[in-house]
Image (tube, rainbow, N blue to C red):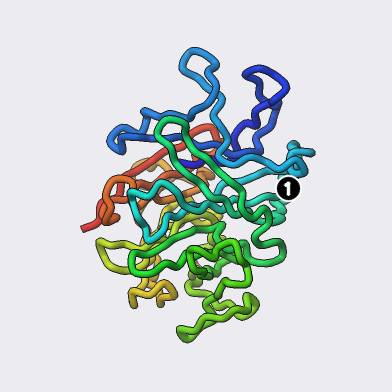
Amino acid sequence: MFFADTSLPDASETYGLVPGGWATNSYTFIENPEDPLQQTNFGRSLGDGYTIPDMAVNWTAVEYEDWNAEMLWGSAMATQRNDPAATWGYLVFQFGLRPTSADDAYVWKYNTLVNVTATESGGLVTNRIVDQLFTSPEIFWGVFSLAAEPSTDYLYLFGVNGIYLYVARVDWASATDVNSYQYYSGDNNWSADSSSAAAIFTLPIQAGGYLATGDVFWSPFYETWMSIYMTSDQNEIYLIYSTSGLVQGPYSDPVQIFETCPTINLTPSVDCGNYAGFAYPFWRRSDASEVILSWSVNGGAETQMALVTFS
């Protein structure tokens, strides 16, 4: 499990953290899906059960120059053909500038492609194989989600622009070659020109906000593509699915599957500001018949989880 907006370790100080350095990424390894609180983060012990977690992806020297303004944000991971026993896969992280005031927005600069290998004894071994995969103002392909399917060797990269969801694909072995990417352009066609990309899903206007975070995955249980996501100004988690079985859809209308805010007298509370909703479809069952949801509670210091069972 990957986390973003975590403390940046201070290399100059033993067991130290950069003051206010909420700009980096970390990860934790959970062996038993029945007990997600038992975690190993391969970090340095601070005593009393606390550790400084290892970073999932290291910064470049240039990125590290101004950690107070910059951030390296974790996004998505995929293994070839959705193999649950795979020990390596691709990660996509994005780099950008933090808001300087409450009225400013994040300014994303580029995303980076990472090769990641899991080891049981030493945590993750990550290698940034393309430091700048896609740069602004392009869609940051793969930041919203990465995915694969059992029947092909394609790596699918999902990107968003406001209320629109897009998909690109590339042969698994050619992921480092941007010229090998194809972009869904509508009418079941794929193009080598990213400017011709067509949305595969549009968030209904009445939903409000934009597509913020989520995951897209092939469901062996239903034999189709599904997406579980959270919007920018709501605390609910939604699901859509491809009615054709194809990654490009068409997709169903959204269905709310979870409310992250507490309820009072059976009425949802006011907007509680929860964010970073994600889904883990293959954690408990290889057929994705049970999906773990996670989200960050407003304030960023707590992650909560829920179990969704399909039938």
Q: Tag 1: Cα neighbours inside 10 Å, few (<14), some, or many (≥20)? A: some
Percent from the top left, x then y, of residue 281?
35, 52
Q: Is residue 294 left or right of residue 76?
A: left
Percent from the top left, x then y, of residue 261?
43, 43
Tag 1 secondary structure: strand
Q: Is residue 123 left or right of residue 25?
A: left
Percent from the top left, x then y, of residue 49?
46, 17
Q: Which image quarter: residue 191?
A: bottom right
Q: Nearer the viewer, residue 155 or 88?
A: 88
Q: Which image quarter: residue 79?
A: bottom left
Percent from the top left, x then y, of residue 3?
52, 40
Q: Nearer the viewer, residue 253 or 248?
A: 248
| Residue shown at 51% from the left, 57% from the top | 231
The amino acid type found where label 1 is placed reads: Leu
Q: Nearer the viewer, residue 256 or 26?
A: 26
Q: How many circles with numbers are drawn on the protein?
A: 1
| Residue shown at 57% from the left, 71% from the top | 181
The quadrant the C terminus occupies is bottom left
| Residue shown at 58% from the left, 39% from the top | 25
Q: Is residue 64 left or right of residue 190?
A: right
Q: Which residue is the site of mark 1?
A: 97
Q: Is residue 266 left or right of residue 109?
A: left
Query: Quick check: can you spot residue 167?
Result: no
Query: Quick check: can you spot residue 3?
Result: yes
| Residue shown at 73% from the left, 22% from the top | 12
Q: Is residue 137 above or below residue 7?
A: below
Q: Which image quarter: residue 81?
A: bottom left
The quadrant the N terminus occupies is top left
Q: Residue furthest front?
A: 173
Q: Residue furthest bottom?
A: 187
